[in-house]
Amino acid sequence: MNGKFTFLKMSLVGLFLITAMGVSAQVTPATPPSAFVCNGQSVQLTGPDGYTNYQWYFDANGSATPAVAIGDSGQQVYTATETGFYYVEVWNSGDGCKSPISEPYTIYILPPLSVSIAANDGDNAYCTDESSTGITLTATITTPDLVATGLGVNYQWFISDDATGTDRQPVSGATSATYNVIQTAADSYFYDVVATYNVTVAGGAEACEARSNVQEVIVSPLPPQPTITIVSTP
C-alpha cells in the first residue's frame, strides 16, 4: 500500500483529544465518514458490492508508519473494535486490477462512562419548612476525564418510589449535572441519574449509558406546635 495515512491528514478544525482503549489520537468527529462506538462494542464496516477480493487496512495512532493490512482478502465486511482509521481496496480475481485505497473511515471507541450522585455536603434530609430551598444532588462522572477527551455528557434524572426503582420515572426538565430536590410532603424520595455521551453513537446512545447509584432524600415533618400545661402548683 502506498502512502502514509495519519490523523493529521484530517481537517485541523475542531480537533480534540480522545483517549480510548489505550490510544491517544487527534480526531475531529465532524469529518465524515466516522462513527463513535461504545467501549466493548463493535461496528461493521462494509466494502462496495461486486468484487471478489477486499483488503482492509488499519492505522491505529497516526504515526509515521503506513497502515497495516488486516482481515482476509475475501472479507467484504470487517468488524472494527479499535479506535483508528480503516481503509479498503478491492479487486476481482479475474484481472487482478486493484482499486486505489479508499478514503479512511474513522472509528472512535468511547471510554466507558461511570457516574455517581450524592447530596451536597452529605446532607440528604431536610424538614418540611425548608422545602422552598430543599437540597441539591450532584452527579459526578468518575470516568473518563471529560476535559481531556473534549467530550460532553447529557443527564436525565429519575425518581422512584423506593431504592429498588419501583415506578421509576424521568423528572421533567432535570437534565443537568445537578438537581435541586424541592418536595413539600414529608416522605422518602429516591433519585438516580443516567449519563450518556452528547454525540451520536453507533447502536444508539443507550448502548453506552451509565446509571448512577440511588440517593434517598428524606423530608421530615415538623412536630406539632407544643402547648404548655400546668402539672402542679407549688
Image (cartoon, grey):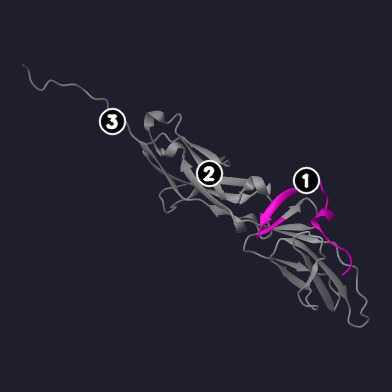
- Amino acid under disc 2: Ala
Name the image quarter holding residue 134: top left
| Residue under pointer 3 | 223
User: Mark 2 or mark 1: which comes first in sequence?
Assistant: 1
Q: Is residue 59 left or right of residue 201?
A: right
User: Mark 2 or mark 3: which comes first in sequence?
Assistant: 2
Residue at 67% in and 65% down:
42
Do tag 3 and tag 1 residues touch (Cβ < 8 Å)? no
Question: Mark 2 or mark 1: which is in front?
Answer: 1
- Amino acid under disc 3: Pro
SS of the residue under disc 2: strand
Residue 134 marker? none
Do tag 2 and tag 3 residues touch (Cβ < 8 Å)? no
Q: CA distance from mark 3 to mark 1?
A: 59 Å
| Residue under pointer 2 | 139
Q: Is residue 63 magenta?
A: no
Give the image location of residue 144, x and y in percent.
60, 51
- Amino acid under disc 1: Gly
